[in-house]
Image (cartoon, rainbow, N blue to C red):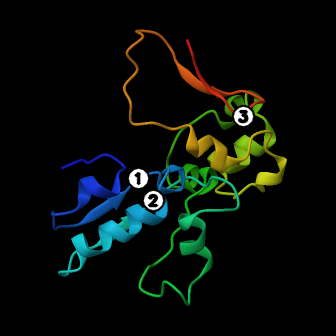
Amino acid sequence: MSLAQNPSTVRGFTGNVYLDEFAHHSDDEAIYEAILPVASLGYQVSILSTPMGQSGKFLRHLDKYHRFPDYSRHEVDINRAMGGGLTLDIEAIRRNMDADSFAQEYLCQFVDESTAFIPYDTIRGCISDQPDLSGGRSFWALTSQGEETLQS
């Protein structure tokens, strides 16, 4: 069963929980609180993600061993994956990305958000569960006056 990244949709179920790309979830604290009862009857919680800056519940789970002692931590960057048999032209990818993006997406590095043009919490706030009904590519933009506009 796959559910939306929404704390209210997971409530009422029991079973193993797999949180994919958890660092990119818009309401990570509430989602984590909601999934613990789901897995509390002996089920497993797995949290996987590429990093997203120096904030969020995912980073705290990795950094705070004493706070979350029941989790094992595993890091698989592109070099380890390729050492395990993944075939990929990593140099072509590196040539087509900036260094910070490559470090975060392929090297499991939590890039300091101070280097970002737009803070990650602002980006997370623009993520919506609303479907794209325009038939094209759409995104929300924040103007300098703080107004939200739909751009197509």
Decide: marks 2, 1 in contact (CB < 8 A)? yes
Residue receiving disc 1: 20
Discs 3/2, front: 2
- Above-or-below relation of 58 to 1: below
- Above-or-below relation of 106 to 92: below
Q: Is residue 10 left or right of residue 20?
A: left
Residue beneath the point at 22% across and 75% down: 43
Pinpoint residue 97: horizontal percent, then vertical percent: 73, 32
Residue type (three-letter) at the residue carrying disc 1: Asp
Pinpoint residue 11: horizontal percent, then vertical percent: 22, 62
Residue receiving disc 3: 91
Residue beneath the point at 47% across and 55% down: 27
Residue type (three-letter) at the residue carrying disc 2: Leu
- Above-or-below relation of 34 to 106: below
Picture quadrant where residue 91 is located: top right
Pinpoint residue 150: horizontal percent, then vertical percent: 56, 19
- The disc, 1 or 3, on the residue closer to the chain's N-terminal end is 1
